[in-house]
């Protein structure tokens, strides 16, 4: 299992990425699964969706460094959680990569995306005119993906339905780099929060954003 990136975000939070090169059989061999999980696998059929499901679970097992069964489920909002381990988790995948973030102390969110120019055709769906007026976002493909990954990571961090990218998450001006951070104002039911999102671009044109903060 080729983990290509592993970083301790803080004392109790870790982010890892790995490139999916294994077959379905090789991934399955490293997992302990129960019947309801085999049912999920059957519903996914073969292909990328199944490889993504298997690879995020195997990466999670590797990060937790356990031989015990990992009961990973999803709540009514679609947020993943662990029944038998005291960790917050976030999962993401895109094409040939899977990303997992875990933390004992903080709610977490991670998003990884393959960079494609077609994002320009949907930018108005997730960015306000004020955000699009920022020169580092505007018509810049990398900047658009930074904004998307940041908002997706924040959405996963929050973990509840009803948070709208364009209406409730506002990217503040930032300097676009291959690796950097930005701040965003998030309108939550409990009030407005300012969060810091870190991001970086990989050598093979993927963008990743992540956030760890008390919810």
Image: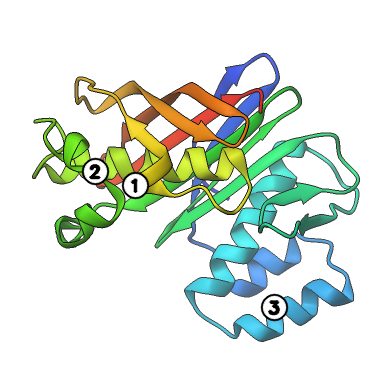
Badge 3 density bin: few <14, some 14–19, many ≥20, Cα 10 Å: some
Q: Can residue 42 be seen in this view?
A: yes
Q: Nearer the viewer, mark 1 or mark 3?
A: 1
At 66% from the left and 85% from the top, the residue drawn is: 43
Indicate which disc, 2 or 1, sits on the residue closer to the N terminus.
2
Above or below, 36 against 151 in this view is: below
Mark 1 → mark 3, Cα distance in angstroms: 34 Å
Position of 198 with respect to 14 (left or right) is left
Which residue is under mark 3?
41
In screen coordinates, is 203 left or right of 96? left
Q: Where is residue 146 in the image (x, y as percent from the top left)?
A: 29, 38
The reply, left or right, for residue 45 in relation to residue 89 is left
Q: Looking at the image, do the residues carrying marks 2 and 1 touch, with CB atoms under 8 Å apart?
A: yes
Q: Where is residue 205 in the image (x, y as percent from the top left)?
A: 25, 47
Q: What element carries label 1?
A: helix
**Picture quadrant where residue 131 is located:** top left
For label 2, the residue is 128
How far apart are the alpha carbons under marks 2 and 1? Answer: 6 Å
Q: What percent of the width, then of the height, locates residue 65?
A: 78, 37
Label 2 sits on a secondary structure element that is loop
Residue 114: give x, y in percent of width and height: 31, 54
Residue 2: mark in rendering? none
Give the SS element for disc 3: helix
Comparing 135 with 65, the one in front is 135
Residue 166's tag is 1
Task: Assign the C terminus to one quadrant of the image.
Answer: top right
């Amino acid at each position: 299992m080729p983990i290509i990136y592993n970083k301790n975000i803080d004392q109790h939070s870790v982010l890892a990425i790995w490139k999916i090169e294994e077959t379905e059989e090789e991934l399955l061999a490293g997992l302990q699964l129960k019947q309801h999980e085999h049912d999920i696998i059957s519903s996914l059929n073969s292909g990328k969706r199944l490889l993504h499901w298997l690879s995020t679970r195997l990466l999670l097992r590797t990060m937790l460094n356990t031989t015990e069964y990992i009961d990973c489920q999803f709540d009514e909002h679609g947020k993943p959680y662990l029944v038998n381990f005291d960790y917050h988790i976030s999962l993401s995948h895109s094409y040939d990569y899977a990303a997992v973030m875990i933390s004992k102390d903080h709610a977490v969110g991670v998003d990884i995306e393959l960079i494609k120019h077609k994002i320009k055709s949907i930018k108005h769906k997730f960015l306000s005119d004020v955000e699009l007026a920022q020169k580092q976002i505007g018509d810049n493909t990398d900047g658009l993906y930074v904004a998307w990954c940041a908002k997706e990571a924040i959405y996963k961090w929050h973990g509840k339905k009803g948070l709208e990218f364009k209406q409730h998450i506002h990217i503040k001006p930032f300097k676009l780099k291959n690796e950097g951070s930005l701040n965003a104002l998030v309108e939550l039911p409990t009030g407005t929060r300012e969060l810091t999102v870190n991001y970086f671009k990989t050598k093979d044109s993927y963008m990743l954003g992540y956030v760890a903060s008390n919810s």
